Amino acid sequence: MPTPADERPTLLVTLVGKDRPGLTSAIFSALDVHVVEVLDIEQVLLRRRLVLGVLVTRPRDVAGVTRAVQQVAAGLGLDVDIETGTGDNQPRREGRSHVTVLGTPLQPAAVSAIAGRISDTGANIDRIVRMARYPVTAIELDVSGADPQRLRSILAAEAAAQQVDVAVQPAGLLRHGRKLIVMDVDSTLVQGEVIEMLAAHAGTADQVRDVTERAMRGELDFAESLVQRVQTLAGLDAKAIDEVYAAIELAPGARTLVRTLRSLGYRFAIVSGGFSQITDRIAADLGIHYAAANRLEVVDGRITGRITGPLVDRAGKADALRRFAAEAGVAISHTVAIGDGANDLDMLTAAGLGVAFNAKPVVQQAADTSVNVPYLDTIAYLLGITREEIEAVDAESGRVTPAPPV
């Protein structure tokens, strides 16, 4: 009867030193002269300093393997540690999660606190990888041995205390299958609120701003608040729409996010409680596949203060997500929704992954994860895409990526 994998005698070889070409090949050539089976490999490189771990089945001649590896390591200037034991990593891989930590900057105390809370749950950090070093520092921890929902709850509190962002997602193939990104527009894809910009032209900015803030906090019904705000625009020259569009500023990283994920086969949609006269042009500019928004009624060149067509409110945003997913042939579980206000809650809940982006507290509490840095392209890190991969996409398209700060 074969020995179970978690009881099989094993040998762990750990090497540390300056990296150089041919190092990994030389180590495995030394192991190859003995009867061993490779069970696991991990390699990390930091400023050309290498840490290489190799787990193999225990050979009959442990001393011979030790001498062979030590001889090769000495020739390469590496420190080596060889340890016998039992089993491989498989038993600790139940309850697996990806934990992404974002900081600007990321302080040692924050990493210590997050790791401490993971340890408190009885979980183990199996692997740590840097996803980005600018414009934020992003690291990803592969964690095993804890329920992802419980881990998310515990780390959310610690993230707030440490003033970093922490996203927890169950590990598995689902993450790689997410292929439709659905974004809110105002204060998510673009900076600020379009209706407030229109209200500035109408002289009703303060009134509209107050109603908007109350609606985004969930204190007012969105549909009612929208009717009140649009009514203040009655009589405004429709040319103001063009002027507002020209003044819109995208969120930092918005173009990068769309460009990168489109090149990887993702589909994009925007849904907005704002106005299609603006959102349709944004979609065309960025190459976004689907768009849904309210439509301002314009008669004889002036805004009437009314909306025409179906209302895109909180429920309407979730309906649009489902409709776009069906049109794209993407399962709801493979969608990502991004938003900041209370009217995004149904959409965030319906999606496979709901991301609260610089959101109101009520939204952060309800979403799967929160991002509180101003860079929209950090969403890519939650999908397992590194900054280096983003730059590679730009390089292939002939774009020049700005150099990171020294």
Image: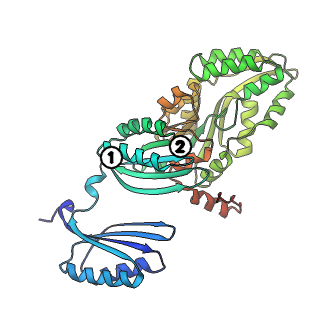
Which of the labelled discs sits on residue 313, or is there none?
Answer: none
Question: Contact (CB < 8 A) between labels 2 and 1?
Answer: no
Considering every residue shown, the one lying at the far front of the view is: 109
Which of the labelled discs sits on residue 329, or is there none?
Answer: 2
Question: Residue 45's x, y, as percent?
Answer: 47, 67
Residue 10: quadrant of the picture: bottom left
The residue lying at 36 percent from left, 42 percent from top is: 117
Residues under labels 2 and 1: Cα distance?
40 Å
- The residue that label 1 is drawn on is 119
Residue 294: quadrant of the picture: top right
The residue lying at 38 percent from left, 70 percent from top is: 52
Give above or below for 176 relative to 270: below
The residue lying at 75 percent from left, 33 percent from top is: 278
Give above or below for 138 relative to 34: above
Considering every residue shown, the one lying at the far left of the view is: 1
Tell me which amino acid carries mark 2. Gly
Q: Nearer the viewer, mark 2 or mark 1?
A: 1
The residue lying at 39 percent from left, 72 percent from top is: 16
Tell me which amino acid carries mark 1. Ser
Q: What secondary structure is found at the residue carrying circle 2?
A: loop
Left or right: where 300 falls relative to 192: right
Question: Residue 111's x, y, as percent?
Answer: 44, 48
